[in-house]
Image (spheres, helix red, strand yellow):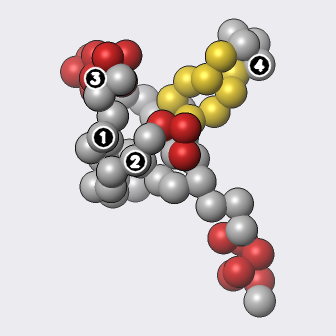
Amino acid sequence: MAKMTEGSCEYCSNYRYDEECEYYVCDVNLDEDEMARFLRGNTRSCPYFRLEDEYRVVRRQM
C-alpha cells in the first residue's frame, strides 16, 4: 500500500468525508509523527498517497 508519490490530500483516495464529524479525515492509521505532519499540512511526500481514480474499475472490466 505504501507508495512514494507527491500529491495533495484532496486527490488521495484515503482522504474521506466523515459524515458523523462533518469534516474530511485520512483513513490511514497514522503514527504520531505522521499525524503531526498531516496536521501541519506537510503532505507533499506522503507514503500512503493513492490518486483517486474512480474509473479504474471500469477500465479493468473492459
Label 1 vs label 3, nearer the camera: 1
At horizontal 40% and vertical 47% (from top left) the residue drawn is 7
Q: What is the number of callouts on the image? A: 4
Q: Please, is residue 60 above or below residue 30 in the view?
A: below
Amino acid beneath label 2: Gly
Mark 4 or mark 2: whose residue is earlier in sequence: 2
Cα distance, mark 1 to mark 3? Answer: 10 Å
Whole-percent x and y of residue 18?
A: 69, 21
Instruction: Pick whichever, 41 or 29, lies toward us.
Output: 41
Mark 1, Cα crowd under 10 Å, few <14 / some 14-19 / many 20+, is: some
Q: Amino acid at mark 1?
A: Arg
Callout in the foreground (4, 3): 3
Residue 60 lies, with reference to residue 49, above or below; the image says below
Report the amino acid beneath label 3.
Arg
Q: Which residue is mark 3?
A: 37
- The residue identified by callout 1 is 44
- Report which residue position mark 4 lands on: 19
- Checking the image for residue 27, the label placed there is none
Distance Cα–Cα, label 4 vs label 3: 24 Å
Q: Quadrant of residue 39?
A: top left
**Among the 4 quarters of the image, the one containing residue 59:** bottom right
- Tag 3's secondary structure? helix
Residue 55 shows in this picture: yes
